[in-house]
Amino acid sequence: MSQQYPALLIIVPLLSALLISITGWINKRLCFPIAVAALAVSAYSCIGLLLRVVDEGVIVYRLGGWDPPMGIAYYVDHLNALVLVVVSVVALINLIGSKKSIELEMPGKTAPFYALYVLQVTGLLGVVVTGDAFNLYVLLEITALSGYAMLAMGDDRAPLSTLNYLYIGTIGACFYLLGVGYLYIVTGSLNMVDIANILPPLYESKAVLAAFIICLVGVWLKMAFFPLHAWLPNAYTHAPSAASSLIAPLVTKVMIYVMIRLILTVFTPEFTFNILAISEPIVWLAVVAIFMGAILALAERNLKKMLTYIIVAEVGYMVGGAWLGNRLGMTGAILHIVNDALMTLCAFMVVSNVAYKLKGYAFDDLKGLFRKMPFTMGAFVVAALSMIGVPPTCGFFSKWYLISGAIQSGQYAFMVALLFSSLVNVVLFFRVIEICFYEPFSDHHGHGHDHHAEPMAEAPVSMLVPLYVVAGGLILVGIYTSDIVNYVIEFAIPKSIL
Amino acid sequence: MKIIGLIIAILTGVLLLSATADFPIFGDPDSPASTHLSPYYIEKTMEDTSVPNIVTAVLADYRGYDTMYETAVIFTAGLACFIILRIFVREEPGDRLYRHVLTGVTVRVKEGAKLPPSDDFERIDTMWTPPDLIIKTVCRLLIPFIQLFGLYVIAHGHHSPGGGFQGGVILGASIILLAISTDLRTAVQRMREKVDAILCPVGVIIYAGTGALCILFGFNFLDYSALAPLLHVDPITARSHGILIVEIGVGIAVMCTMIWIYNILSSGGKYDEGL
């Protein structure tokens, strides 16, 4: 059975998404168990696959039994096996933790929501696992479509901000497709490894350069890399809690993965770092992204929106790290995909717990929250420490690699940006913690009750347990960073990058 | 802002056009696209899959995995329309109109009131216009032939241009034509929302399930030759049959999604009366 892991991890969610949309018309209560079971099988296959890859090296799975490049093939190496585990585990934990919030926010439409949720995970897993440039685009479409539908189910402004995202996201996907089209015209192949083998004599060709640039810009649009980030904050802020805590940790990270895959596999490091010589301006762009993300986050008075701007800054971390062009930077970028997915998940799950009880997450609503929801806020502190980069939480280690990489390649501006953003994160999170801890809970019934302890109104246990699993994961991943780097990421980066 | 946008658009256009200078000449037989993979498909398709139409073989077999997800994309689009636009109302407020079939008398029923159950009265739209006899008759005559042609296009994809997507669109269009030529209620009576919404994922399940069945037989996903013992044919003919099975799935999914989206959009999400 383990031979079929690459197929199972994506086919099981796809079939169950379809099954959920059928059972939704017959018995709505079955939808949630089916979704959880599907994602659990998928996560199990992903972990099994990662262990196999660590043991055996690259695994090739030929779909339909056709040899590549005639048919479509999966190439599972250390890089995508790691990202697969992150995607499937994050999606599973978030689904278990979001049941109550989905039922509260979308009464009557839970069944199609679960179906879209599982479809979204299918799309993300498919983008990560595939070794075919066009197949990646098809799955990108599934991810995007199901994402738009879920994001649009939020508050009154959600449809408009999602429409904005839809336009930008469609342009991004079109750019990527156009780039793949250019590559097909000059190489005649869609298979990533095959393209990489054909390309070397064509490195001087303008068409290859154009293909690379438009693919890159398309992916940047999708990951909200700074000047192309404008769609992200509103789309994520107004979305339903369950959707934003799935999409915010995963979609941007998966897009970073796609960028790294393009750099490392399709165009090879030789072309991207030696022949093109565009690393420096891109690292500078990343510096601007980090500064702007941090400053825009400072200006926000709304917890969820503040977190979305932090995502913009974090995207800058990873793009900058990947384009430093050395081993440390690339290690930092890949490690940060794992860490940032977990940190963002933890922070957004806190937001969804808060939204479940408070119906609002502007700073004024959060007063006295430590007394009201002590356990949720405990997890928030862990997420905050990780985003700031305090050891032993995992955020520290990826930042350490990124900063070391910046110093090694002499990109001191990037180092300064990373440190600046960490300092801003300190201000951001301690401001929130201060409001929640010291200011009394706003009481609309007069002032008589102010001295008394606020009654505790904690989120349900079914939301708290997954939250604490993630918070524990932040620390565990931090402690086991050296294992992840030595056994997985070390092999994910080609030897040619020093 | 508009000027900046224009400048960026022009720059992008110049970049894309200047890159085409390095493209092979249009229709060049020595271009990579026609020398790298195409010869294999042209020479081997018949041997590998026993399908005369190379396009169908590439679409549904060599790259069948892409096509499965294209079908899933269509299903996702339908589901997205449903979750965003569909409004569930038990009983719409306001008056309802009924028409006495035999005499043509229209009865207005006030809000909350009920008409005794009877076959003589049919519910009609609030903006009701008597159906045009010519349009109604012509469409009634046409629809069976359109549907027959749709089935032909699906089944004949192996030999001629066609296949599940095209055939599914034709089948879906026939039901939409019924909705336009009479009214939405008549079309929904032929194909209820529940049936439509269940058939839509069933179409994709036929595709993905065929692929998953191959795993159960110990082959790779979507390797239709695994179905040979099941279909009592040799592995190569099994590929051809496998393609037909998945094309039928695609046809069902596309047809139902089209009808579903049209009904939701035209009725403003209420699924009762529309264009």
Image: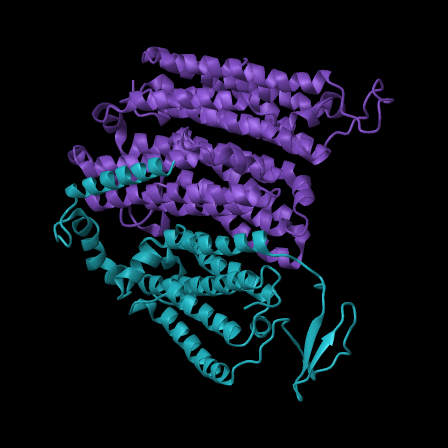
Chain colours: A purple, B cyan
Residue B115 shows in this picture: yes
Which residue is at 62% across, 17% downward? A431
In this rendering, position of residue B231 left or right of residue A435: left
Residue B236: quadrant of the picture: bottom left
Quadrant housing the C terminus of chain A = top left
Question: Who is closer to the viewer here, B148 or A440?
Answer: A440
The answer to whether residue A441 is above or below residue B54 is above
In this rendering, position of residue B200 left or right of residue A417: right
The answer to whether residue B68 is above or below residue B196 is above
Residue A429: quadrant of the picture: top right
At which x and y percent is residue A164?
A: 48, 42
Residue A47 shows in this picture: no
Question: Who is closer to the viewer here, A178 or A321?
Answer: A178
In this rendering, position of residue A373 left or right of residue A445: left
At which x and y percent is residue B213?
A: 46, 56
At which x and y percent is residue A129?
A: 40, 39
| Total number of numbered discs in the rendering | 0
The answer to whether residue B165 is above or below residue A219 is below
Furthest-bottom residue in this view: B102
Residue B117: quadrant of the picture: bottom right
Question: Who is closer to the viewer here, A392 or A75?
Answer: A392
At which x and y percent is residue B174?
A: 46, 73
Furthest-right residue in this view: A448
Which residue is at 56% across, 14% downward? A426
